[in-house]
Amino acid sequence: MSVQNFIPKLWSARLLANLDKSLVFKNFVNTDYEGEIQNLGDSVVINQFGDVTIKDYTGADIDNPEEVTSATQTLLIDQALYYNYKVNDIDAAQANIELVDKAQERAAYALGDKVDQKIAALVTGAGTTVGTLLAPISITKDNAYDKLVDLGVILDEKNIARVGRKIVLPAWYLGLLSKDSRFTTNYKILEDGVVEGAVVGGFQLYMSNNIVRDTTDTGIYKIPAGTNQAISFAGQVVETEAYRPEKNFADAVKGLYGYGLKVVEPKALIQFLVKQGA
């Protein structure tokens, strides 16, 4: 090959921006027990106290004290994800960026996306379901707002705190809301999926493309609505190791992430089965 025919490749110092999904479902869980786990296979026993009886006082001797009962649930750290990638020495030499650092950022995002989808899937454990798979609620610009208000009433009737209520909506639902004059026209969707400047029916709105869709009819969305009382989550980076693969001239990194998640208070979660109307 002659010198004049050799055209070297130039490695850009800039990376093409990734078209990432917003990862919002971590806002739907409590991580109260995360500090109590260390390794894959750990478990946390969660206590929940029963009610205390209130009685009329007449001046006579009071009854013997009642024993406070408690129910227990176990949160198992029984799921794991891993990554294992390499960056060839020739790439590292020619590229004007820290490829390993960037690859680690992508690995962290990919882990987060997988966990986001796992949390989203727990919507099926909700204590209340509005709509059915055979007859999902048809959402149009005329009822999109009112249906969210109705969901808030359902939580009110179950004594679920108004503080911290959240709902995750698909992009098309937000589009229909924006056509209702009662919905603020001064909202924007932040990078983390939060719909800033918009609260409907007491719910802070989020937008995500990780909402679960029915496997037989992908037009049906399983929207979660409630508070983070409903789901407990605990995750831990178990191992991260940088190494040199034996048969490659490359730097490699592998990591292991263990986690567990569970619906612990179904009353605080609604599964809203919807379909985009005509």
Image: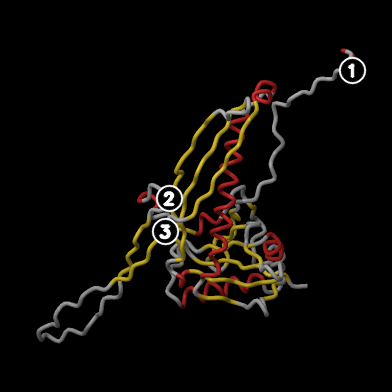
Residue 160 coordinates in the image, percent (x, y): 44, 71
Which residue is under mark 3?
76
Which residue is under mark 2?
40
User: Would you place residue 189 above or below residue 273 in this image?
Assistant: above
- Identity, as a three-letter code, of the amino acid under mark 1: Asn
Residue 179 coordinates in the image, percent (x, y): 72, 65
Q: Earlier in the sequence, mark 3 or mark 2?
A: 2
Q: How is the image coloured?
A: secondary structure
Report the residue at 43% width, 64% height from top: 229
Residue 141 appears in the rendering: no
Residue projecting furthest to the top: 3
Q: Identify the image quadrant of residue 24.
A: bottom right
Which residue is under mark 1?
5
Secondary structure of residue under mark 1:
helix
Secondary structure of residue under mark 3:
strand
> Is 155 displayed left or right of 209 in the figure?
left
Q: Earlier in the sequence, mark 2 or mark 1?
A: 1
Q: On the rendered image, what quadrant is the N terminus found in?
A: top right
Query: Distance of mark 1 from mark 3, alpha carbons?
Result: 62 Å
- Identity, as a three-letter code, of the amino acid under mark 3: Leu
